[in-house]
Image (tube, rainbow, N blue to C red):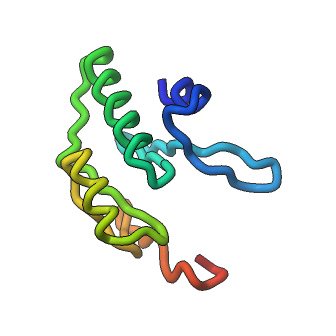
Amino acid sequence: MLFRAEEIGLTEGFSVGRDRTRVSLLQFADDTIFFSKVSLEHLQNLKIILLVFGQVSGLKINLEKSTISGINTRQELLSSLASVFYCRVSEWPLSYLGLPLGGNPKTISF
């Protein structure tokens, strides 16, 4: 569903590498990380996709356990986007499965 939504412009991930591979989500065990432009419309579309997925699959998406993080994004904007999902805002660096993610976005290593 997400790949189709990206094809028709409802959501948009980002491109990486020389061949500009599109990345819109990563999945690890029972966790999913979504990537999106900073766009209220795209995030509202993502929320609709998740709700439809929950209805179709019978799985419950727990948005209250979710977080939103931004790179080079104002805290006020992140807070307003988090209200769409009823989730918390995480700040960088954050940790996932006990491992630190992120760092100083102004350094090359980041």
- From this view, report whether residue 91 is shown above or below residue 67: below
How many numbered discs?
A: 0
Q: Quadrant of residue 13?
A: top right
The answer to which of 14 and 98 lies nearer the viewer is 14
59 left or right, relative to 36: left
Q: Position of residue 12 (x, y in %)?
A: 55, 42
The answer to which of 24 and 79 lies nearer the viewer is 79
Residue shown at 50% from the left, 51% from the top: 37
- From this view, report whether residue 72 is shown above or below residue 86: below
Q: Position of residue 17 (x, y in %)?
A: 75, 55
Q: Quadrant of the C terminus?
A: bottom right
Residue shown at 42% from the left, 72% from the top: 100
Q: Position of residue 1 (x, y in %)?
A: 48, 23
The answer to which of 99 and 1 lies nearer the viewer is 1
Residue shown at 67% from the left, 50% from the top: 15
Q: Position of residue 54 (x, y in %)?
A: 28, 24
95 left or right, relative to 58: right
Residue shown at 39% from the left, 34% from the top: 45
Residue extending furthest top? 56
Q: Quadrant of residue 97?
A: bottom left
The answer to which of 93 and 15 lies nearer the viewer is 15
